[in-house]
Image (tube, rainbow, N blue to C red):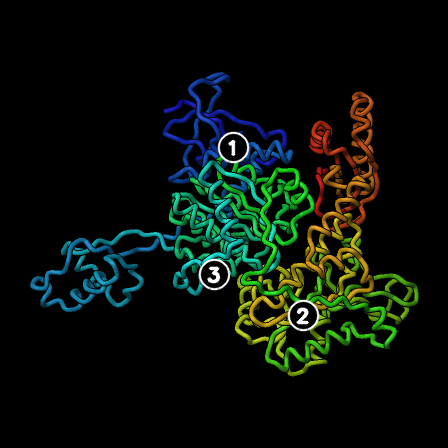
């Protein structure tokens, strides 16, 4: 037994982000969660290293008090992953270690196994001995028929009989964990894998060979409907046949039930699910099934990349282009990069799958960092849907001031008359996007955030989508007293309202953040639509990808311009991806599909190439713009973001950091040419949740960014009076 252990304590303070040595009065292992004395209190910590010698005075070394779990909670390779993440994302090690276990396992009210009394058979029934105890014999036969073990709660009228049987030595009463299953309907009957097409088989063979020979990184670029999910299933089967485990990541919780159904049909009780909508107990039980090897296939959202699989063979990142794979909380990690590292650790295969890969990912694939595999056609030769670009300027000339073009209304009417289904995409929730005074021009903004509030007709409230503040809409202008209050813009609520006026007999389902708040909110809406109880599904981007509805023949994008007009250099990329994905929901079965892109900018290259589903052409034009404008991947964007309630202290903190950076540049003149641009300025959204915001923005040469980012990371941890400072590298939102 080792004499000492290095422990990372559960204190997220930069000055305490180091190893503390403790004596080991009992056997501990790397990855154990322990209770240790720290100052005047006892706190949780993680054992990260064992040793027999200490470089610290023996008399000052305290002892570990206790272990929290029977088995090490964090696998050794996940400790190594956390160390890598600390360096990569310039954060504290304890923040990375916290990602490796369910959050509900930490703290005073930590969740654990749910234990219930159960009855276990010790010996078979003796008819002669129990001939006069018919109830006891009946209970014993029941236990035998159920495999020799039953929870006591399933025998509510038989406690006396069980007690008698226990006394006679036929059964024993034990404590048994009760699984809190997230599969409310139970597992579906297992189904065989489909026979792959020639293109799918070629992809499967290439990636399977890599799995056998020590791993590899692949980008599977396939048009919508090309059967990427079936390829994933065959690769999972290959991993299981090799005695290995697999992780399947999906970007949206809305997609998780569909993927779970798919994989549970193929792999039964061998599939586990991890995502944030599970209850604390369900999440722990699923995590524990994975940790103990009871489940070999993990399906989940971003955090499932940290699933405690001990013999990893495969990670699939489906819809890899999605921004939800980037964590916006500390540590601000990129799931794709973490997956690359996990696969490298274990010699596993990584598959990034998408019809519209990130520009960065495709760029790296063309440079050889990923092996590029392309699926050019839909399964069984199904045609791509017919895409119509509708110029809404012409609709105005014709006198049509509706949010729907004449062509889309006609297509919807024909669709409903034929008993088919349709989908309408509007990437903004609410009824109106802002409320403004037509007299003075002032927009009603959130008092805690520098953003316009959105009107929600369902509860007649203005709501801030940043902090959640809500209030009734004003009847007169708070600024000038005018009664010329008007409502502008459109969201999913208004689309639903207008559709109900046009097609009053149609059942409509709406899917956005307002309608999917409950645990099974996504699943209920998707099930209603899949079963045909709703003819039309209206939604935000959560309806755009991954879903396969055979009866959908018409898809309409109500406004392309909303996506194209965002103040972000990635707007064309994100618009192209969403348009291509949502178009792919139409015509996926035998019925042909029609898609309508409504826009006031019909010649925009993102719209044109999305209509053709021509990713390569879009990439070539977009990467040219990135190269010319020195945007990522040719540069790195970084910003020091300061926030705090006192604007004066905030400005002082930003000024202090700016001066420190200028001094560093002066002392390191060789770095000046690598900083292409930097500027201290107010953040685009200057006020959120009662805090003012200021930023120092940097554009850095991608090839020579590490030393500069290291200095900025140290600068962000300096500690500023009255201000919080965060370093963001290529932030997902420039606002």
Residue 254 shows in this picture: no
Residue 248 horizontal/vertical position (percent): 51, 50
Please, what secondary structure does the residue beneath circle 3 have?
A: helix
Query: What numbered label is drawn on residue 261?
Result: 3
Badge 3, how many Cα within 10 Å: few under 14, some, many 20+? some
Cβ atoms under marks 3 and 1 closer than 8 Å: no
Query: What numbered label is drawn on residue 594?
Result: 2
Instruction: Please tell me which residue is depicted at 52% across the width and 73% down the height of the picture.
Output: 531
Query: What numbered label is drawn on residue 434?
Result: none
Please, what secondary structure does the residue beneath circle 2 have?
A: strand
Q: Is residue 146 above or below residue 732?
A: below
Nearest the eye: 629 or 433? 629
Measure the C-alpha gap from mark 2 to mark 3: 28 Å
Between label 2 and label 3, give the one nearer the viewer.
Answer: 2
Of the residues under marks 3 and 1, which one precedes in the sequence? 1
Residue that numbered label 1 is attached to: 80
* Position of the N terminus by quadrant: top left
Of the residues under marks 2 and 3, which one precedes in the sequence? 3
Cβ atoms under marks 2 and 1 closer than 8 Å: no
Measure the C-alpha gap from mark 2 to mark 1: 50 Å
Cβ atoms under marks 2 and 3 closer than 8 Å: no
Between label 3 and label 1, give the one nearer the viewer.
Answer: 3
Residue 476 horizontal/vertical position (percent): 86, 69
Residue 9 shows in this picture: yes
Instruction: Please tell me which residue is depicted at 51% across the width and 60% down the height of the picture.
Output: 257
């Amino acid at each position: 037994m080792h004499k000492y252990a290095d422990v990372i304590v559960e204190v997220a303070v930069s000055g305490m982000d180091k190893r503390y040595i403790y004596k080991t009065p009992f056997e501990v292992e790397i990855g154990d969660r322990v209770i240790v004395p720290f100052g005047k209190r006892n706190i949780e910590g993680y054992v990260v290293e064992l040793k027999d010698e200490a470089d610290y005075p023996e008399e000052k070394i305290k002892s570990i008090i206790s272990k929290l779990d029977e088995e090490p909670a964090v696998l050794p390779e996940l400790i190594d992953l956390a160390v890598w993440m600390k360096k990569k994302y310039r954060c504290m090690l304890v923040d990375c270690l916290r990602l490796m276990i369910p959050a509900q396992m930490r703290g005073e009210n930590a969740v654990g196994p749910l234990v219930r009394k159960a009855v276990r058979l010790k010996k078979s029934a003796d008819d002669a001995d129990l001939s006069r105890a018919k109830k006891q014999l009946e209970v014993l036969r029941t236990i035998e028929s159920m495999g020799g073990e039953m929870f006591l709660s399933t025998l509510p009228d038989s406690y006396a009989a069980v007690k008698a049987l226990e006394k006679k030595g036929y059964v024993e009463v034990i404590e048994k964990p009760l699984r809190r299953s997230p599969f409310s309907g139970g597992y579906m009957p297992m189904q065989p894998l489909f026979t792959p097409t020639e293109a799918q088989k070629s992809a499967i063979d290439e990636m399977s060979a890599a799995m056998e020979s020590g791993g590899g990184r692949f980008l599977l670029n396939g048009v919508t409907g090309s059967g990427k999910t079936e390829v994933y299933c065959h690769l999972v089967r290959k991993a299981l046949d090799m005695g290995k485990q697999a992780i399947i990541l999906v970007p949206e919780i809305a997609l998780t039930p569909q993927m779970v159904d798919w994989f549970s049909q193929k792999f039964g009780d061998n599939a586990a699910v991890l995502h944030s909508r599970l209850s604390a107990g369900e999440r722990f039980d699923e995590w524990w099934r994975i940790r103990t090897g009871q489940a070999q296939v993990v399906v989940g959202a971003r955090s499932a990349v940290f699933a405690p699989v001990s013999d990893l063979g495969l990670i699939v990142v489906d819809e890899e282009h999605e921004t939800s794979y980037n964590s916006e909380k500390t540590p601000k990690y990129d799931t794709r990069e973490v997956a690359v590292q996990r696969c490298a650790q274990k010699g596993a295969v990584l598959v990034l799958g998408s019809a519209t890969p990130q520009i960065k990912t495709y760029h790296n694939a063309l440079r050889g960092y990923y092996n590029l595999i392309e699926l050019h056609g839909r399964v069984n030769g199904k045609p791509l849907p017919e895409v119509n670009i509708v110029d809404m300027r012409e609709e105005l000339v014709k006198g049509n001031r509706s949010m729907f073009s004449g062509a889309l209304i006609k297509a919807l009417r024909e669709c409903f008359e034929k008993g088919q289904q349709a989908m309408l995409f509007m990437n903004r929730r609410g009824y109106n996007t802002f409320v403004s005074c037509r007299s003075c021009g002032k927009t009603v903004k959130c008092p805690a955030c520098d953003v316009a509030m959105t009107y929600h007709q369902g509860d007649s409230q203005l709501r801030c989508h940043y902090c959640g503040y809500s209030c009734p809409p004003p009847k007169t202008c708070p600024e000038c007293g005018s009664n010329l209050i008007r409502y502008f813009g459109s969201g999913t609520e208004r689309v639903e309202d207008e559709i109900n006026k046009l097609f009053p007999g149609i059942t409509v389902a709406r899917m956005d953040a307002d309608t999917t708040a409950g645990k099974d909110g996504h699943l209920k809406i998707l099930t209603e639509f899949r079963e045909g109880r709703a003819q039309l599904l209206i939604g935000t981007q959560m309806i755009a990808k991954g879903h396969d509805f055979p009866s959908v023949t018409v898809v309409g994008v109500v406004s392309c311009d909303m996506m194209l007009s965002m103040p972000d250099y990635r707007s064309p990329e994100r618009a192209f991806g969403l348009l291509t994905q949502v178009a792919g929901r139409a015509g996926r079965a035998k019925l042909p599909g029609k898609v309508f892109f409504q826009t006031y900018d019909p010649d925009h290259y993102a719209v044109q190439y999305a209509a053709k589903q021509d990713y390569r052409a879009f990439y070539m034009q977009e990467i040219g713009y990135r190269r010319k404008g020195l945007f990522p991947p040719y540069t790195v964007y970084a910003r020091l973001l300061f926030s705090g309630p006192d604007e004066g202290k905030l400005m002082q903190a930003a000024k202090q950091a700016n001066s420190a950076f200028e001094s560093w540049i002066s002392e390191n003149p060789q770095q000046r040419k690598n900083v292409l641009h930097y500027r201290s300025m107010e953040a685009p959204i200057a006020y959120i949740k009662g805090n003012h915001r200021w930023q120092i923005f940097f554009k850095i040469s991608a090839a020579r960014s590490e030393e500069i980012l290291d200095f900025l990371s140290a600068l962000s941890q300096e500690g500023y009076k009255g201000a919080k400072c965060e370093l963001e590298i290529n932030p997902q939102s420039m606002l």
